[in-house]
Image (cartoon, helix red, strand yellow):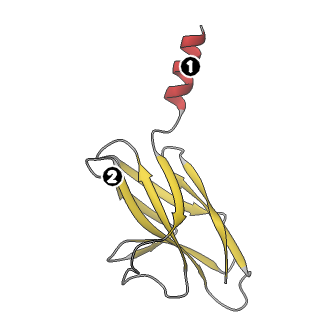
Amino acid sequence: MLAALSMTLALSQPQTHLVVGPWTGKDLAATATSAARYRLMVTGKPNAVLHLRASQVAQGWLAAFCTPNVCSPTQVVVNLSPSGRAVIQFELIREGQDAAGRSGARITGSDGSFVDVPVATR
């Protein structure tokens, strides 16, 4: 019975892992200069397609998922490589002086995976 319970728990867990850390790469051409930048590492099933959405962003802030070519506000579709990995620059952008002074975010995958983004201040 314990083995069946363990198997059920294992199967119910998302296969995708999301990890957020400081952005360490060079600035991408499509990114905002005043943004708080994070490195979002996505690992999962090779060649999987995952829809990511940002939530819990303070009013007056914008969350964006950036590649070298484009930044997508609030959500993005990620195609994992044959190795099952993808790296995305995630940004929190304060849109104006009236916006809250700080914001974090939660990034949620279509498979139920999630990660909380550390609070940024601007």
Estimate the x, y position of residue 54 in percent, counting from the top left. 56, 63
Which SS class for mark 1? Answer: helix
Going from the N terminus, do you reach mark 2 or mark 1 first? 1
* Amino acid type indicated by mark 1: Ser
Q: Quadrant of the N terminus?
A: top right
Left or right of 52? Residue 45 is left
* Amino acid type indicated by mark 2: Leu
Residue at the far front in the pictured view? 24
State the count of labels. 2
Quarter of the figure with residue 60: bottom right
**What residue does disc 2 label?**
80
Label 2 neighbourhood size at 10 Å, few (<14), some (14-19), many (20+)? some
> Which residue corresponds to the image point at 47% horizontal and 61% vertical from the top-left?
40
| Cα distance in 3D space between marks 2 and 1 | 28 Å
Estimate the x, y position of residue 73 in percent, counting from the top left. 49, 73
Label 1 neighbourhood size at 10 Å, few (<14), some (14-19), many (20+)? few
Left or right of 52? Residue 122 is right
Q: Which mark is residue 6?
A: 1
